[in-house]
Amino acid sequence: MTAVATPSTAAAMPVTVIEPARRWNGPALREVWRYRDLFTLLVRRDLVARYRQSVAGVGWVLIRPLVSVAIFTFIFGRVVKVPTDGSPYALFAFCGLLPWMYFAGTVGAATQSVTGSSHLISKVYFPRVILPLVSVVTGMLEMGIQFLALLGLMAWYGVGPGSAFALAPVFALLAGVTALAIGLWLTALNVKYRDVGQAVPFLVQAWMWLCPIIYPSSAIPEHLRAIYALNPMVGVIEGFRWSVLGAAAPDWTVLAVSATVTLLLLASGLVYFRRTEIRFADII
Amino acid sequence: MAAAVTVENLSKRYQLGLTHARSLRDLVDRVLHPARSRAADALPAAAGARAQGGEFWALRDVSLEIEQGDVVGFIGANGAGKSTLLKILSRITLPSHGRAVIRGRVAALLEVGTGFHPELTGRENVFLNGTMLGMSKAEVTREFDRIVDFAGVETFIDTPVKRYSSGMTVRLGFAVAAHLQPEVMIVDEVLAVGDASFQEKCMGKMSELGHEGRTILFVSHNMAAIEKLTRKCFVLDGGRVSFEGPSADAVNHYLDKMESSAPTSGDVSRLPRASWSGDRSIEILALTPLATQERDAVRPLLRWRVDVRANRDVDDFTFGITLEARNSEAIGSAFTAALGPLAAGVSRSFELALDDPGVVPGRYHLALATMRLDREVMDVVHDVLHFNITRVDHLPEGLLEWHPGWGRICIAASCAAMASPASNQAS
């Protein structure tokens, strides 16, 4: 939005200037900060609404990954015998699933975040970018709980943390940034074209097979890895698994390519979101 | 001192292909069936001109200035541009041209209880709604007790809102908004919800805010509320400001325009009905005035013929008549005796007459309803059978003009001197 509130020295009152849209109005960080209380309350609302009236409650956060890990371990660990660079298959799969489930869930939630709040968009002003941001942070809290379960599973298998364990939160954060980057694009597109909302679950499902979750990225031929790493989640998952299990050092080219793609997507996503949000209330 | 709100040449254009499907469909409907839609929501005939070349100007070159501490109203037919103007001023949407400057903190209340989530408790929703309207958490905490007190929901404050009655939800929502303490408050049609006593409370709170020197921009279709609350009004018509001035004049200007476009007698079967106006088991088809509408001609205030048709078998029914002042404030109501059964498909005509309650000079109209005996409305037409009263019957001697503050009915009183004063009883 072009409207800016700045304290006026003369009357000591904020002055709001409302003008037609300009091409680019900056990332609106100050506006987001001004609405930080709303942000935290929306995160809280999403968590409460999700778990308050369910029997298993927060248990679902653990049930989903644990069941998936059990199935993957049976099929790919026992039956197909996928190589894991030396780690127990259950841990290998969990380390891949944890950032992936977060990413998939967040992208899905973010895509619906604006269209699902059309009643808010048309009735009250706040920086719209808060809505996908809320999805990113809500998922983080769930990922944190799952991370504790992962530590428990590691203790069960008698596997100690890797030497780069302190970097695990960094890669978790990178997963958040990647989800935000993709989320900004899809959220804004979904307001204009509802087909996006239909396509995302399918897209995410297909995307999963392009990530080193059930198989190690060492299974990809070496000359194709740079292309493989154009998928930003490849770097996230590889890095996370390495920092937690410390098994195989990641391919640094892969990490660099993935991180660059993430940053490019984030910058372009933010620009696109800010330029379309001007018309959200008109077209939603 | 600088004006609280300055609007310069503000315009809003909607690209037809990109608007929301519903508004687009509405728009096509208006252009294709101008007569019907004019009756349906009294959209000005300018609609065609406003929608040219795949564009629609919801607002065109609006300039206005509102001083600090002013309480101003915006009136106009549906589609006149009121909501668009308010949406721009509350930053929900951006203008296509022009500029607006607002000095002071703004709170826009376009709906009561925006963002209320049914699973959250009243307490949680107060915080969510308050921060959504621009308060910080600390400010909500400070006002919390007053908010709960105003809404009168102390006992249920930790109960999920989904268990609230709709009245409680509305009360809580308005209570949050009433404690925003902004310098500029934008209020759109919120008084249309809630029960009468709560509406009264809201009106009180809003005039209190006005007296505290806050600037209030108020949109309503309730002319009585507009006149009570605001001193000055802008009338919007076809996306432009067509009148600006004292509220009473503005209301008259607006009503004059509305009257010339809508029939108030004759075939009323296609008049718009309010959404709650019943199942039309007995439908009101036509109204014909029978007597001259001046009181010196005939004793009843008004006599008219009404044609109805039963669309379903009805055991028994009655007419309900509400006499309303020009701003649709109710003066009083009357009900006829039970009129017996009516079989489906049968049409009937009745002659109705309304006694004179002693209304003072002014313009009046009726709302007429067919009701079951438990007063459940079957059909109702509003704003029909306009008439003028030009003089008061038993006006006290020497009094030439009736002051508006005295009400709308001139009541006969009597007074007789008593034999001895009662003052010596105290000793």
Image (tube, grey):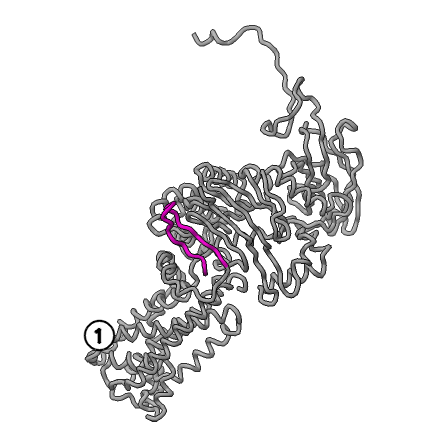
Instruction: Judge left or right: residue B237 versus residue A134.
Output: right
- State which quadrant residue B255 falls in: top right
In the image, residue B319 above or below residue B17: above
Magenta region, residue range: A1-19
Kindly identify which chain the residue marked by label 1 belongs to: A
Q: Position of residue B215 (x, y in %)?
A: 47, 43
Asked whether residue B158 is in view, the answer is: no
Q: Nearer the viewer, residue B119 or A44?
A: A44
Q: Position of residue B67 (x, y in %)?
A: 49, 42
Q: Is residue A48 magenta?
A: no
Q: Position of residue B108 (x, y in %)?
A: 47, 50
In the image, residue A73 above or below residue B76: below
Q: Residue at x 47, y 66 (%)?
A: A23
Q: Is residue A3 magenta?
A: yes
- Kind of residue at disc 1: Ala
- State which quadrant residue A68 falls in: bottom left
In the image, residue A280 above or below residue B307: below
Q: Residue at x 63, y 37 (%)?
A: B330
* SS of the residue under disc 1: helix
Q: Residues within 10 Å of mark 1 (few under 14, many from 20)?
A: few
In the image, residue B42 above or below residue B227: below
Asked whether residue B421 is in view, the answer is: yes
Q: Residue at x 30, y 79 (%)?
A: A95
Instruction: Judge left or right: residue B352 versus residue B9.
Output: right
Q: Which residue is mark 1?
A: A166
